[in-house]
Amino acid sequence: MDTFLLLLAPALAATINAGTPLMLAAFGLLVNEKAGVLNLGAEGMMLLAAISGFAVTVGTGSATLGFIAGALGGMAAAAFFAVMVLWLNTNQYATGLALSIFGAGLSAFVGIPYTGISLKSTSMAIPVLSKIPFVGPVLFNHHPMVYIALVLCATLAWFLNHSRTGLVLRAAGESPESAHALGYNVRMIRLAAILFGGACCGLAGAYLALVYTPLWQEGMTAGKGWIALALTTFACWKPWRVVAGALLFGGVTILQLNLQGLGVAVPSQIMAMLPYVATIVVLALISRNPDWIRLNIPASLGKNFNPNSA
Amino acid sequence: MPDLKKRSTLKAGLLVVASSMMLTACGDKTETKTAVTPAATPAAAPAAAAPASGPLKVAFVYVGPVGDGGWTFAHDQGRKAVEAAFGDKVQTTFVEKVPESSDAERVFRDLASQGNKLIFGTTFGYMEPMLKVAKDFPDVKFEHATGYKTAPNMAVYETKTFEGAYLAGVLAGKTTKTNKLGVVASFPIPEVIRNINAFTLGAQSVNPAVTTRAVWVSSWFDPAKERDAAMTMIGQGVDVLIQNTDSPATLQAAEEKGVNAFGWDSDMSAYGPKAHVGSAVINWAPYYKQAVQSALDGTWKNGETWWGVKEKSIDLANVNASVPEEAKKAMEEKKAQLAEGKAIVFTGPIVDQSGKEVVAAGKEAEIGMLKGMNFYVKGVEGSIPK
C-alpha cells in the first residue's frame, strides 16, 4: 500500500499540472459560449500566447510579464476573431478554424529564433502545507497559476449564476434578440466575452510554454485547444465540472506514461492516442441524450446576431 | 444605407491588410514548416548546372530544428566542419524540420533538381523517400543515416551510439542510489532497443543489481512529452536517466528534481549543470569530411559505414567533476578498450528477459542480431511495444 501511495502522489500532482492549461482555456471558452459565441480558434490563440509569453520571458527574465504578455497575445488574436464575427458577420465556425490554422502558422514563424532556448521552471511550495505526508506534494507544490485557475473557477461560478452582469451575459447567449430589445448592447457584451476568452486561452498557452514545458516548440499545444473545446461541452458549461473534466483528460495523459514506466505492455501508439480517444468517447456518451444537451446549451450558440437588422 | 458603406470600407481595409501580410510572408520563405538557409558563401545561380570547376553542392536534410541541442544540432556541427575544412570547394545548404513523410520526398527532389550532388538524409524515416528519389537522379549521391537499404547511388552511415550508451551505463551503474535507471525512448526500432540494452549492460558490468525501464514518447523531438516521460519515471524512483530523443527536456527535468541524467548526441551540460553526468556526443565531422572528400576525388562508394569510439565518431564527454573517481576510471577503461576496436558491448554472456542465453560467453553478437535487435536483456523491465 505504501509503494502504491508513493507512486500515486507524483501522478496526482502531475495530473493537476496537466489539467491546469486545459482548465484555463476551457474557462475562457465557457464564457465565450455562454455569450453565444463559439470560438474554434482556441488552439491558435494558445499557440500565439505561448510564443508571446515565451519571447517576453526570455527577453525580460520575468515570468509574470510573460503571463501578462501571453494573455495580451491571446486577446489580440481574439480581437481579430471578434471583429470578423461581430462586425463583419462571418460564420463563427469558419472564422474560428481559420484563426486556429493562422495562429499555428504565425507562432511557428515567430518562434524560429526561440527553438532551443530553455527557461527555469518555477513552482511554489506553500510553506507548511506542502510538508503534509500525502496531500502536501499533491496539492500544495504547484505553480501559482494553478491556484489562480481555481480562484478563477470560483469567481466564474459566482459571476455567471449570482450576478446581474452574468445574467446579462447569459441573456446575450440565450436570446440576443430579447437582450437587444431590452436595450443591452449585445455586440459589446459578446466582444467583452470574446476578449476574456482570449485572455484565458492566452494564460493557458503561456502556462504551457513557461511552466509545463519551459522550452518553445512549434505546435507545442498538441491539440490541447481542441480538448478544451470538447471539455466545455462535456462539462455542460458549468465551471466546477470543467475542473473535473480537465483533471480527467490531464490524468489520462499522465496515466499512460505511468503505466509504461511500470512496465505494462500496451502498444505505444495506443498510449499516445489515449487523451484524444477519451475526448471522443466522452462526447459520444453525452450526445446520447439530446434533451440533456438542449437543456444546457446556450440557445443562440454559434448564431450571429446583427443589431442593425434585429 | 450609411452602415453598408461603413461595412464595405472596413472589408476593403481588412482585405488590403490581409493581402499585404500574405505577400510579405510569402516573400523569402517557401513553407511554414521548412526553412532553407544558404551557407555563408553567396549562392551560385541555381539555373545553371554546376560545371566541373564550380564548388560541389552538398545538401543536408534534418528531421528536427538545428536549435534542438541534440541530434540535429550535432549533424549541423558536422556540416559546419565540412565548410571549414573545404572552404570554396563546397557549398552547403540545409533544410530543417522535414517530417518523415511524403513531404521528405518533395524536399529531396527539390534539392537534387537544384544541383546538389551529395545529399545527406539524417533520420531513419527518410529511407523510402530517398530510395525513390535516388532512382530518378542517378548522378546525385545520397547518404542515408541510420538506415539499412542502399542503392548504386545511395549509401548508409551510422554511428555506434550504443557504445556511448554503454559508457553512460557504466557511469550510471556507479552513481545510482536507487538502482533504478530510466530511458526516455522514441520509437521501438532496433537502434533504440540496442541503446537501451547497451545502457543496461554497461550499468550491470559495474553494478549487477540495476534495473532499467523505458517510456516511449513516439517522437524524435517532442520536449513536452519527453519532459512528461522523465517526470513520470523520476516519480517512480528512477534517479539516473538517459534518452534516445533529440531535446534536452529530460536533462532539464532531472535538474529540477535533483536527479542525474545524460546528454545525448550533443553536449547538453548547459541545460542541467548539476544533473549532468556526461554527454554521449556524436561527432559527425570525421565521416562527413570523408564523404565529401571522396565525392570530390571521385572515389565515392555506396557502402555501409558504422563508426564508433575508435573512429572518434562518438565519445562520452564532459563528465561532471562531482562524479566519483572510481566511476570515471571504470568508464575510461572501457572507453580505452572500445578505442582499440574491441567489441565489448555485446560480447557474451548475454541473457534475455526470459533467462535464455542469446549470446554465448566470450562470443561477439552477430551483426544481424545487432542490426535487427528486438529483445530486451535481463534487467530491463517491461516489454517492447509493438
Image: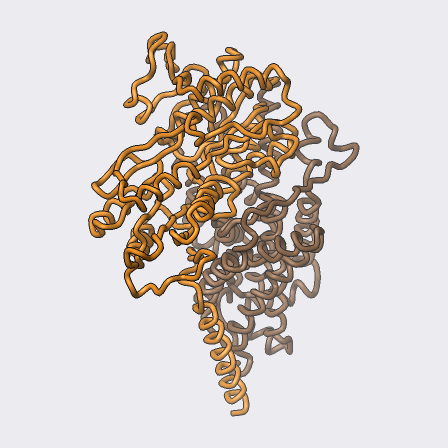
- The location of residue B47, given as percent across then percent down, is 30, 65
Quarter holding the C terminus of chain B is top left
Q: In this view of the protein, which residue sits in the foreground, B306 or B217?
A: B306
Residue displayed at 60% across by 66% down: A76
Which residue is drawn at the image coordinates 46% and 34% (left, top)?
B282
Instruction: Tell how many labels.
Output: 0
Which of B54/A288 is in front? Answer: B54
Q: Residue at x 66, y 42 (%)?
A: A120
Please, is residue B13 above or below residue B22 in the view? below
Query: Residue B245's x, y, as percent?
Result: 47, 36
- Note whether residue B15 is visible: yes
Q: Where, by quadrant of the figure, is residue B111 drawn?
A: bottom left
**Residue A285 in view, yes or no:** no
Q: Which chain is brown?
A: A
Q: B385 or A36: nearer the eye?
A: B385
Judge left or right: residue A24 versus residue A104.
Answer: right
Q: Is residue A200 above or below residue A118?
A: below
Residue B92 in the image: state x and y as whole percent: 40, 52
Placement of B30 over or under A124, stated as above or below: below
Res A199 → quadrant: bottom right
Image position, residue B273 (x, y; %) = 64, 34
Question: Please, which residue is most extreme toward the top here?
Answer: B361
Chain coloured orange: which letter? B
Q: Is residue A303 left or right of residue B269?
A: left
Front residue of A149/A122: it is: A122
Residue at x-position 37% and y-position 11%: B348
Quarter of the image for residue B120 reads top left
